[in-house]
Amino acid sequence: MGWQGVTRNLLCGVVMAVCTSGFVAHAQEVRAPSKGQTLYLPIYSHMLYGNLGKSGKASYVLLSALVSIRNTDAKRPLRVLSARYFDTNGKLLAERVPTPMLIPPFGTMELFVELNDASGGSGANFIIKWDAEQPVSPPLVESLHANMDGGKAVIFMTQSVPLAE
């Protein structure tokens, strides 16, 4: 194996170590039971990359986003009241949950932003409101971003944070 192969293997090992250590830290986080929250979830309709071109703008790649709202409570359902989708400028683009939806224990609700929907921009977000009749383990809310066109793959995740009310 040449230096190029060694360097690539070393880089892959470092990336895996960094990704794994971040995952372990999140996996051990214990969240207090709650009767409801408002969550902020960052979404990327596209991702800027590379250098600025002659036009002064960076290149970009479009991304789809699979939003996953997972009920982590083993005994009680929770209810998603709304999932409002905003663009980079804070303009409301859509309400993706027009009527409240119940998620059973260990159930998952999925929302999808298509690859060809670049309306949100690189600073898009969902504001997700949920509640429950009794305190439950808060849901795990993540988004898997992907583009697998042209023999290359861009895949990464974002996770929600609760907003103060």
Image (spheres, rainbow, N blue to C red):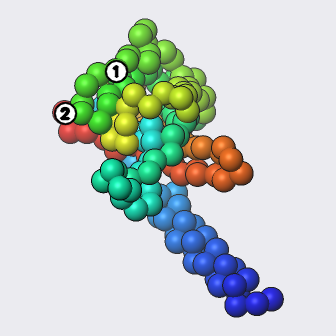
Residue 49, percent across and down?
44, 56
Residue that appears at 43% across and 9% down = 99
Circle 2 SS class: loop
Mark 1 and mark 2: span between their CA atoms?
A: 22 Å
Residue tagged 2: 165
Residue that appears at 60% across and 78% down = 11
Query: For the residue marked with disc 1, what is the amino acid?
Result: Leu
Write down the quadrant of residue 53 in the picture: bottom left
In-image side of 36 versus 148 (left or right)? left
**Image label count:** 2
In-image side of 9 versus 155 (left or right)? right
Quadrant of the snapshot with the N terminus: bottom right
Q: Nearer the viewer, residue 64 or 111?
A: 64
Residue that appears at 46% across and 47% down = 60
Residue 130, percent across and down?
38, 25
Residue 158, percent across and down?
45, 47
Q: Nearer the viewer, residue 142 or 136?
A: 142
Q: Is 69 placed above or below 84 here?
A: below
Residue at the front extreme of this rendering: 54
